[in-house]
């Protein structure tokens, strides 16, 4: 009799990693799909962004009636109509995940809502929008999503100091990882010193991966020759080195005093984990980066692929020397990973801004 292979998504829990769904829509909510994923695959969180909401509102029939009612009110702006739709979805997802949030005392069960990309270079505007959205959603398991721009770093510190849980997005380099961790530590230190309950603050740092390989591979192909052997390895190397930074920053020696007062380490989250190059393993950015106290947020297709044929083994702390050598080799070929990360952040922000404009056109 053939042995039945268990769902590899469930084994990730025993290895300390949580899987979040990088998608949200009323179709997923109202037709029971998200509830099923939570029950059967132990999905422990949900992320959203302007691109996801544009796709949801433009394609799902479950928004049409409410959107028409909202459009009949001339006092509402297009952004207010969008937020009304999005906040209802976020609240429903938060409610669905609330049992996980409670049973893990605030470690799991989060849903992310992004501030307007138009505020990416406006620290004060991001702070105000983040606090406003937090109040509007009124759920403890909400994460306010903020980009890791220079202004975003200021806003992240301020939001955390105000006791707001934050998902930092659009990170593409070790510099981004380090800057964001420092902003979080400053913010949670201020929150603790002001007498706040640090245990109610959660933060994750979202490092985007597949876009890194897409850009770096393109540059390696331009160089040619021996450089071609480095293709498809840069994003995984980046994540492994970022995790080493995480371990250093949030070790007992560095973070211990804050941890004793209830502060949580800022978890590393692997984002953009759908493999873009069809020549690569379709679960590359899951299988290669499994380790404790991490999150992987995956699109529907990648989730299904890993459920079907993924291998759940501890891999995040293997081949660290090879990751360092990858970075050194890229440097020898004239590729600066921090500079590339900054370029990718600008590009990613532009894509979100474009999606947000499409959203507003949809709700105008």
Image (tube, rainbow, N blue to C red):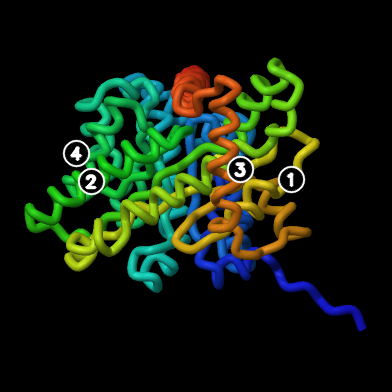
For image coordinates 33% across by 69% down, the residue present is 105
Residue 306: percent from left, percent from top: 71, 56
Label 3 crowd bin: few (<14), some (14–19), many (20+), radius 10 Å = many
Residue 203: percent from left, percent from top: 34, 50
Residue 318: percent from left, percent from top: 58, 57
What element does badge 1 sit on? loop
Give the camera-side residue of 313 and 88. Answer: 313
Which residue is most to the left?
A: 194
Please state if 195 lies on the left or on the right of 72 as rendered.
Answer: left
Q: Quadrant of the N terminus?
A: bottom right
Name the mark on residue 282: 1
Instruction: Determine the CA span between mark 1 and mark 4.
Output: 38 Å
For image coordinates 65% across by 39% down, the residue present is 233
Query: In the rendered image, which residue does mark 2 sit on?
Result: 160
Do the numbered discs 2 and 4 sit on residues whose CB atoms are within 8 Å? yes
Query: In the rendered image, which residue does mark 4 sit on?
Result: 158
Instruction: Determine the CA span between mark 1 and mark 3.
Output: 9 Å
Residue 63: percent from left, percent from top: 54, 37
Instruction: Determine the CA span between mark 4 and mark 3.
Output: 29 Å
Name the mark on residue 38: none
Give the camera-side residue of 317 and 177. Answer: 317
The part of the image, by quadrant, that contains residue 12 is bottom right
Give the camera-side residue of 81 and 119. Answer: 119
Do the numbered discs 4 and 3 sit on residues whose CB atoms are within 8 Å? no
Q: Where is 320 relative to 39, above or below? A: above
């Amino acid at each position: 009799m053939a042995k039945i292979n268990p769902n590899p998504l469930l084994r990730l829990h025993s290895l300390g990693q949580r899987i979040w769904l990088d998608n949200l829509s009323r179709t997923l909510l109202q037709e029971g799909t998200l509830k099923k994923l939570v029950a059967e695959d132990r999905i422990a969180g949900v992320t959203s962004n302007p691109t996801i909401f544009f796709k949801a509102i433009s394609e799902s029939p479950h928004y049409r009636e409410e959107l028409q009612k909202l459009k009949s009110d001339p006092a509402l702006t297009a952004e207010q109509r969008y937020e009304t739709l999005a906040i209802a979805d976020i609240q429903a997802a938060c409610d669905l995940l609330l049992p996980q949030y409670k049973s893990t005392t605030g470690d799991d069960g989060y849903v992310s809502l992004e501030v307007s990309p138009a505020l990416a270079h406006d620290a004060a505007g991001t702070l105000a929008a983040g606090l406003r959205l937090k109040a509007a959603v009124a759920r403890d398991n909400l994460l306010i999503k903020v980009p890791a721009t220079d202004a975003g770093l200021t806003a992240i510190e301020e939001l955390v100091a105000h006791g707001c849980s934050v998902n930092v997005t659009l990170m593409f380099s070790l510099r981004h990882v380090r800057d964001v961790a420092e902003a979080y530590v400053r913010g949670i230190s201020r929150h603790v010193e002001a007498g706040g309950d640090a245990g109610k603050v959660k933060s994750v740092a979202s490092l985007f991966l597949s876009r890194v390989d897409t850009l770096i591979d393109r540059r390696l192909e331009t160089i040619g020759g021996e450089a071609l052997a480095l293709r498809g390895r840069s994003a995984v190397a980046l994540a492994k080195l970022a995790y080493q930074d995480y371990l250093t920053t949030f070790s007992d020696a560095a973070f211990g005093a804050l941890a004793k007062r209830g502060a949580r380490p800022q978890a590393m989250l692997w984002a953009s984990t759908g493999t873009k190059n069809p020549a690569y393993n379709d679960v590359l950015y899951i299988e290669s980066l499994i380790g404790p106290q991490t999150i992987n947020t995956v699109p529907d297709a990648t989730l299904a692929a890993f459920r079907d044929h993924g291998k759940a083994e501890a891999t995040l702390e293997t081949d660290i020397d090879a990751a360092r050598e990858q970075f050194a080799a890229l440097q020898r070929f004239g590729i600066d990973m921090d500079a590339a990360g900054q370029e990718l952040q600008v590009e990613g922000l532009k894509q979100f801004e474009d999606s947000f404009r499409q959203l507003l056109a949809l709700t105008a």
